[in-house]
Amino acid sequence: MRYLISLITLFSFAFGIVDLGTYGSTRNISEENFIDKAEKHAKDINATLLKDELEKGKESYLSVDKVVPTCTKTQTRSFTPTFVVPADVVLPNGQVIARAGEVYNTLEVMKKNNISIGTYMMFIDATDKVQIQLSYMYKNQGSIFITNGSMQKYEQITKVATFKADKTIIEKFNVKCSPSLLIQKENELVIYEYNPKELVKEAKNDN
């Protein structure tokens, strides 16, 4: 009998067709209706202020604090990016394909998986007109990374999309100063560093 009552009650709850009555004491709801509260807050929001705050947030996100100094010497160097395996890499069948602590050449691993950087990577200070002009020369050949200044302003001036050069990227590609041009050669990176002052002198001499 109890089983039958429970079954009927459950069925009633599912379809909402039975009034089970009131049991015990009751109280009126004192909390403000959620919908009313939301609408009240929405009316209090200043649309202009909200827009300004969003613009400030966007500008802040697209601005980069100086992460590397300006190059003081024009030179070329090479760098081999590597990574350390943090833990054993084991296949489902139990085969270990990499041991914890082993060091791998990042570019070799990418090559085995048919992945390549494929383009130049240029790191520049977007507050320096010389570096902006230099980067514009490579706008169709590679990716531009901003190490200082406003990405938004740079893109407005050049119409070229950019990337933020945070500390992780700087360390990963061993960028020491700006402007720097990175090119992949086999299993290493060739890094060209330019002294902006020397670039200006060369331009004057060419003229």
Image (cartoon, rainbow, N blue to C red):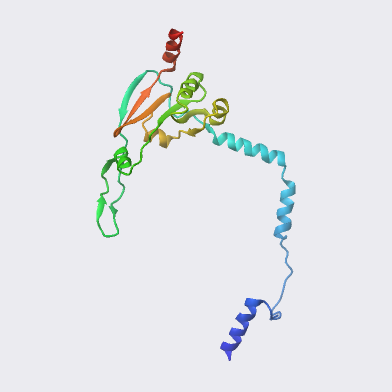
Percent position (x, y) of residue 163? 48, 34
Percent position (x, y) of residue 102? 25, 44
Q: From the image, which quarter does the N terminus lie in?
A: bottom right
Vertical comparison of 168 with 138: above or below: below
Vertical comparison of 85 with 159: above or below: below
Residue at image point 36% right, 29% down: 183
**Residue sticking out furthest to the bottom:** 1
Q: Quadrant of residue 175?
A: top left
Vertical comparison of 11 with 2: above or below: above
93 on left or right of 46: left
Badge count: 0
Q: Which of the two residues, 87 or 16, is positioned nearer the viewer here?
A: 16
Percent position (x, y) of residue 171? 38, 34
Q: Quadrant of residue 53?
A: top right
Q: Which of the two residues, 28 or 80, is positioned nearer the viewer here?
A: 80
Residue at image point 35% right, 26% down: 191
- Whether residue 177 is visible, yes or no, is no
Q: Quadrant of residue 77?
A: top left
Vertical comparison of 191 with 104: above or below: above
116 on left or right of 155: left
Residue at image point 45% right, 13% down: 200
- Whether residue 13 is visible, yes or no, is yes
Percent position (x, y) of residue 69? 43, 24
